[in-house]
Amino acid sequence: TTPTATVVLGGLGRGQQLGQLAGPRGICGEGAIYVAEQQKVSCWYPQSKGFCIPGDIFLGTKTLPFLEPSGLCVHDGWLYVADSKTHMVSRWMLKDASVGQLVAGGQGPGDALEQLNRPTAVAVDAAGRVYVSDFGNDRVVRWPGQGRSPRVEVVAGG
């Protein structure tokens, strides 16, 4: 038999109102489900009947804006966000959506080792190193974790 799909997030049309999604591009989950949308990341909480209710919204800040968030990853109490239009990866405290830090890029678009060009995905390993899919440069770049030496390495492609 063919499995039946169920709408668990959004489903109330495209938009910015409670219960709506606007162009979802990325998703990840760890307890809650996080969705990258137009200029924001929304948080949804699963319920016992298979549906989710909307929760916190991560909007970025003036210095770390979300223009086109796409890749998401949750690690050790932080939400990591790759933004294709700002050419950077930032991380945000799950307990306080207003606290963010630059993790990778932020030097404008380019192909230098410290630059990103339309990052689309992000992952964090057990050691806290950040891996970024750098779409515009056809490479995967590894950035050191917080408090480590600032050595950036290409680990695939580019």
Image (tube, rainbow, N blue to C red):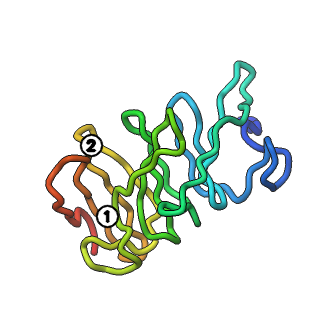
Q: Residue furthest right?
A: 12
Q: As shown in the figure, which amino acid type bears the numbered disc 1?
A: Val
Q: Is residue 58 above or below residue 88?
A: above
Which quadrant of the figure has residue 104?
A: bottom left
Quadrant showing the C terminus: bottom left
**Dot 2: element:** loop
Label 2: few (<14), some (14–19) or many (≥20) C-alpha neighbours in 10 Å: some
Viewer-nearest of discs 2 and 1 = 2
Residue 65 location (% of width, % of height): 54, 62
- Measured as percent of width and height from the top left, residue 77 is found at 41, 34
Q: Residue at x 64, y 56 (%)?
A: 37
Q: Which mark is residue 128?
A: 2
Query: With 77 as the anchor, is 36 left or right in this view?
Result: right
Disc 2 marks a residue whose amino acid type is: Gly
Determine whether, in the image, residue 118 is placed left or right of residue 139.
right
Question: What residue do we see at 31% from left, 80% from top?
Answer: 111
Residue under pointer 1: 140
Say which of 17 and 136 sits in front. Answer: 17
Badge 2 or badge 1: first in the primary sequence: 2
Residue farthest along the top direction in this orientation = 48
Residue 91 at what x, y percent from top left? 42, 49
> Which residue is at 38% across, 57% downward?
102
